[in-house]
Every structure is written in C-alpha cells, then in structure tokens.
Amino acid sequence: MKLRLAAAAAFLLIVASPLVSRAAVGAAPVVTRSGGVTTITQLDASAPLLHVVYVVRAGLDRQALSQNGLAALTAQTIVNTPVSGVALRDAIAAAGGSISFTVDPDDIRFQIEALPQDADNVLKLARTAFAAPDFDPATVRSARDRLITRIAENQEIALQVGLDMLNSTLAPSANAGLPAFGLPASLAQLGPDDVRAFYTTYYKRGGSYVSAAGRIDALSAGALGLLGATLPEGSTNAISVKLPKLEGASRQLVAQRDISAPWLIAQYGAPNVASKDFGPMLVLAAFMQRTLADMADVPGVVSETYASRAVGAVYQYENPQPDLVLYVNGGIGNPNRSFSTALSIASILATTKLEGSIDEFKTMAAGDFISSTNTLEARAWLAVVYDENGAQPDYLSRTLDAISQTTAADLQRVARSYLGNPTIALVLPREDS
Amino acid sequence: MMPGRAILAAALAVMLAPLAAFAADGPSTGSLPHGGAYTITQDATLASAAIDLWFRAPGAGYDNGEPGISRVAATAAAAATLESGKSLVGLVRGVGGHLAINVYPDLVDVSASVPASAARRVVAAMSAAYFSPAIDDDAMKIARTDVAVLSAQEHFSPDDLLHDALFAQIFVSGPAHYAPIPADLSDFKSITLDQVKAFAKRAFRSANATIALAGNVDASLLDAVTAGTPGTADTPIPSSLAASPADKTINAAVAGEGLAWTGPPIADERAATALDFVADYLFRDETGVVSKALDPTGDDYVNGQFITLHDPGIMLVTIGGSKPAAVEAKVLGAIAALQTPLDPATFAAAREAFIYHLASDSQAPTEQADNLGWYAGEGNGAYAPSDSASTYWKAARSLDPDYVASVVKKYLAHPVVVRLITTNSKDSTS
C-alpha cells in the first residue's frame, strides 16, 4: 500500500526543483563527408585514450532469413583475422588497444580504442584486417565458436532475451529482427564461402561512419581518412523481407530460460532523436524510472539496492526503431503488482490531465543523459546516432535544450501518442529449474 | 627572483584561493581553505562532475568495538537534513545525480556524480554534511535500514563474503579484520546515536578529508567549502597480520572459494605495480590467461585483483561455479608458471595491454575521482594510476620479465584459502 502511495505522490508531480541548466562543455563534434564516408571528430585532449567507432552498412538487414548470424560471423571473422601472426584482436591488445563489435539492425559497429601513442599503429592493424579478411576455414571456425559462446552468455541474461524478442516485433523487415549473433544451428550452416560473399557484397564505403573521440591529436594527419577509405567504393541496399503479421488479440511473448526468477518486460514504440517528441520522451522515461524505483525499493534508503536495480525504464533512442522498455525482475517479491501498477500509470498518464511541476523529472532526465555521455565510446556513437537521424551531431546541447523546453502538455501528448498498447515479454524460469 | 608586484599578486592569490600545486599533465593538489586536502583532474569537454569526499576512518570504530559504525555514520550524515532543508542525498538526486557511499576497512568514500552545472551546490552540501554533521534520530533510522538491506544482500554475494573472510584470516586485529558491512546485524543494532555522533565528529573532520574532483571541474568549486576546522590528518590506519593465517571453511547461503596472499605495501610502488600486472595478465575478464582457459560453456568464473593498501597490499582471487577445485588448480598453476620469466615478446605484449587497461578503466570522471581518493587515502596520492603522469605509469613502464617473476616468487607462494559451502555444494572434480 505504501509503495503505491509513493507512486501516486510522484504522479502528482508537485515537487519543485531547479530547472535544467546547460553545462559549459567543449566544442561540438566536427563533421566532414567525402566519398560516401562521414567522419566525425570530437577532440578531448584530457582523455587518456582515442576511441573510434567505425560503422559499416553490413548489419542484420543485409542478411537473408536463411543467413541468420552471417553479419555477426563476418564481423567476428575480421576480428579473428591473423595480422602479424595472431588474431587482429590479440594483435591490437598487444599494441595497446582493443577492438570489439556490435551488430545492429542496419549496421555493424566496430569499436576501436588505443593509447594515444599507439593509436596510429592500432588503426593500421585494423585497416589490414578490414581490407583483407582471412576466410580460411580455421579462422571462420574460430569466429563461429566465439559467437556460440556469446550467444550462450546472452541467453543467461533474461532482460536481453526479452529485449531480443521485443525488438524482433518492431523491426520493419523480418531479417532486421533476427538475433544479433544468430543461432548455433544457423551458424553451423554458414561457411567460409558465405562469409566471403557477404563481405564482398556489403563491406563498402557508402553510408559508413568514422567517428572518433578523445586524443585525436595523437593521430598522424589523414589516419582517420585512411580508415574510411579502407573498403571499396560503392553502396548497398538492405534486403526487405516481409512476413505476414501474426493475427491474434494477444500481445505477449513468452520464453523460458535457466533463470531463478521471472522477468516482465513491456515495450512501447518511441520517437527518434530528431523528433520533437524526443525531449518529452526522455522526461517521460525519467518519470517512469522514478515511479518503478519508488514502488520496488525500501522506502528512504540512501544506497542503491538490489531492489532498485531490479526495475527500470529504458528509452532505446539509438535503435533504428526506438522504443521505451519497462522491466521488472521477479526476484524482488511480487513482480505482478509492480508491473501492473507501472502499466496502469503509463495508461493513466495518457488520459489524465497533469498538474504541478515536471521540473524534477526534467532534471533527472538531463542528469541521466549527461551521465550516459561520460565514456569516449558513448560520445563517438551518439554523434553517429544523431547525424544519421538527420539531427546535428551536437548531441549534448541539443538534448539538454529538448529536455529544458519540455512542458507538461508535451509530456501528456507524448504519453498519449506512444503509451498505448504495449507488447509484453515474459521470460520465465524453466519448469525444471 | 620574482618582481615585487608579482609577489604581491601571488600573496593575494594564496589568501583568496586554495593552495594549489599543479603538476604538469597531472591532477592539481593542495589544501582546502578550512583544513583537509584536495586533488583535481579536469576535463572541460565533459558535462558531468564527480565529487568524492574521502576520510581515513576505521570501519569498526576507533576501538574496533562497533563493527559497521563507519557505514552507519557515513549514511546517516548523507541522510541528515541540512540548513537548506534537504539532505545531501536528496539534493544530489534532485539535481539529476547519483550518490554512493563506499566504506572500506580503513576508508570512507562519499561519491557524487552530477551535472557540472550543479557541482558547486553539491560541494557545499557535501562538505557541510560531513564537516559539520547534524545526525539525528531520523537520520539514524534511515542509516540502520540502509545497512540492514546491504547486509542482507551481502549474504548472497560470494565475492564480498570471501573478501571479508579472507581479510579476517589474514589480519588478526585492526580495521582490516572486520567486515565494513557486518554480516551479523546484531553487531551494529546496539550502536547508539551518541556513538555515531562521536565517531562522525572525529572521523569526518575537514582536516582528515581529501576531496577528489574530476570531470568538468576546477579549483574555484572549493570556494563552496565553508565548513571545517584546520588541523592534522590522521595517518593511515594499521592492521596487524596474523602470524600463520589458517584456511577456513564457512557455511553460507552461496558457495565459492577465495585465495589470498600478502603483498607489498603501497610505498613499494614497483612491486605493487608488478602484482597489478600479474592480476591483469592472469585474471582480467576475457583477456586473462586463466579467464580464457575456463570452459566457455561452463559456469565457472574467476576474479583476481591486487588490492593496494598502505601496508601490506593483498592479492585476492575468488572462484565460483560448479568445479572450484579445477579452477583453483588452474589459478595455482598459472601463478607457479609466472615464477619463470615470460619470454620478452609475450611480456612486452602483456605489459602494453596492461597499460591500456589502466587508461581504459579510468576514463570516466567517477572512476578518476575514486582512484585519486583511494591512493591518497592509502598514503600515496602521487601513485594514482588514473593519472598517466603519475609514478604508477613510470613503474608500469619499468616492469620486466625477471622482476615480475621475482615478485611472484617472493609474494605469491602460499595462499590463505577460504571456502564457502552450502548444503548443496559439490565439486564434480573432487
């Protein structure tokens, strides 16, 4: 009962607090475009490292449905390609850096990082493998083994399982909703010839990004340009795979995994970063986060607890199909009550006139966004997300302005537009676990 | 020699601003206006600020008779209502930030991450909350609840349980013998408001504090520190080593195994850095030699770190999963192998990777402030690895295969072992 009172108090939005204010920050990202490659730089001479995000249009939407996992297998083959006698990943580690990748619905994103004095050499090593991956069966096999391990790791994370299911329902094309790393069974069907063909077809310069943050001053002139020019010229198109929508009243997806408690996840569609609804949705996400935490946590505690981490609201604005996700980990006791209350509040927000100030939630939204920009990787990637959505890549000032200008009417409009009928994912413990 | 006008200007600057000693490319350090020290590392391209307030304070009290008192006192001070009508934790959350209280056997860290535009208000509130604590019954009630929740959580954290149990075996007395968050709630339920007030008054003196600032910050923020009394900082708090620490088996809610070795003090920078290198080379997630040798399809895991302390430091390894004996054999085998110097090429690659990890692990302001405060608290602020101009990086660059092998041979011979067992514990290899 008390928890619901806390949620209701938050709903009344009567707490006064300071307005969002913009921090004085460094120069905005610098964008240059040439030959289909967009280069973004953010110099931070105080940073200890250089970080480069290299984006290639070779993501899930370039796979056919029968090629589930091929985008990831190609990227992993590049990372495992022998350079100077060892896999690229190990060669870069030995040279004072790291390389990893993320599979997105519409791109592959390589994250390359290096100590300033090693940055030139690390980028050179990366270029070597990007330009000429090794399609030897042993290299492809090692890449497949690594992906199978990563799939197994993901399957132990209930929230990830739920998000994967939900993301597949939002995807505009069926292939873009496939699992990021594929499935062990589908990977087993893919060999060196498939990887070579995928690389040859889709690893082109067109639409690629080289976004660098941190110690750019440590690079020799033209180093980022050389990275951008590594792949052959040309552009590619996504493969559109339309499947008939499933008919039915239910909007629930259910999976069972080896976990100790159920997870309940609700997904709503959400605006992208260039939308006028972006700022209000950030504030709305902050409101939902606070409401869920108030319901779940021990009242009055100072420290972050397991209970407060077991619930949350995440606005995934970086996705090609952005969404707002609410989640509750059943390990906190009575997940049904927390979850149903959260859904009720989302529904009420869309229909009830708001009273009082929303400043507290604007401040929270600004603080959360600022916190999310502390790493070089986040800074490099956010600049890409904003640019490819048609917004200026000055993500920080644009976002803080959008939050600052949000009114209670905006919040209600956005709630009405987006918080309608959610899709629900339930990730349950296996019956024998 | 300085001209007269410059001397006058310099004298005025000393009166108007905190004493500052700027190191080239490193953090600036100096004295707070009303006692205590500060260390600042600045990155004006960021929009956030990390504000950490560190104290040397014994976790179980100055007579080691009240386990958990430093945690209760630090939490109560954060929860107490300030003159503004808000508590520190309320203020930090109200500006869109996060507050964390981290308590170690010999140190207390109050850490805030906030938008840079709110940093001045938070510095003022944090220094007021701790340098002139106003802890009352309401704040005590919050602190007791908070510590009770954390204590309950720790029963299900094998790494925390093993850390505390290994320290209890290695240190026979002093703060390191006691868990910062007591597992037995009866240990701190009897702590009174008066005891907490007395503890806070002594431990949270401004003279005993180091403020570590990182991110979009500068020394002018320190003008917001209005509370405090000049004085002398406490020296690092010693704990006594057991003559022959024994292995131990403990019944617990979760299973696990821990190994620990006594290492060099923080003053022996090269040896301490060598053991950091060993931990990175063997145990770092995904890249460590032992970590990579575990079956990726199994449930076994290993964590290893060298904990740099005033004297001595501790190498600590924790193991989880269904085959702890097999993982322990891998750990001990890998450490024994390091008594033989690595070949030069392997060593050079591992050292460069280690140095990269140093930078990668301390790129966010919260990590930098945490790092600067910890090393200052343990008595060697100039050795903080978040600063690439520090003596730490010089020591890291100076490591060679023969020296690392000699340090392994000297310190990592015979571990103390603690095993957590549950009624369901079993090791399929034993």
Image (tube, helix red, strand yellow):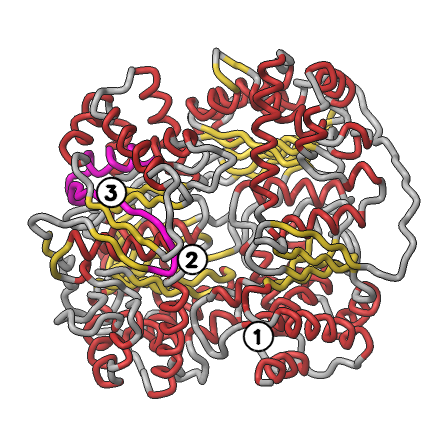
Vertical position of residue A414 compared to residue B267: above or below:
below
Residue pictured at 42% horizontal, 63% vertical: B112
Chain letter for mark 3, please. Answer: B
Residue B209 in percent (x, y) is at 25, 64
Please give the label number shown on residue A294: 1
Please tell me how crowded label 3 is: few (under 14), some (14-19), or many (20+) other residues with Cα within 10 Å. Answer: many
Residue pictured at 48% horizontal, 49% vertical: B44
Question: At numbered mark 2, what does the secondary structure look like: helix, strand or loop?
Answer: strand
Q: Does the magenta stretch include residue B391?
A: no
Of marks 3 and 2, the one in the foreground = 3
Q: Mark 2 points at which residue?
A: B50
Please give the label number shown on residue B350: none
Of marks 2 and 1, the one in the foreground = 1
Q: Nearer the viewer, residue A354 or A129?
A: A129
Which quadrant is home to the N terminus of chain A? bottom right
Q: Is residue B261 magenta?
A: yes
Please give the label number shown on residue B315: 3
Q: Are marks 1 and 3 on the same chain?
A: no
Q: Which of A233 and B353 is in front in this view?
A: B353
Residue A73 in percent (x, y) is at 66, 26
Type of the residue with mark 1: Asp
Instruction: Work out how far the residue at label 3 is from the one at label 2, CA to CA, in angstroms.
Output: 28 Å
Question: At numbered mark 3, what does the secondary structure look like: helix, strand or loop?
Answer: strand
Type of the residue with mark 2: Ala
Residue B392 in percent (x, y) is at 26, 38
Residue pictured at 70% horizontal, 18% vertical: A191
Instruction: Work out how far the residue at label 2 is from the one at label 1, CA to CA, in angstroms.
Output: 25 Å
Q: Do labels 3 and 2 share a chain?
A: yes
Magenta span covers which residues?
Answer: B252-280
Chain letter for mark 2, please. Answer: B
Please tell me how crowded label 2 is: few (under 14), some (14-19), or many (20+) other residues with Cα within 10 Å. Answer: many
Residue contact at pointers 3 and 2, CB within 8 angstroms: no
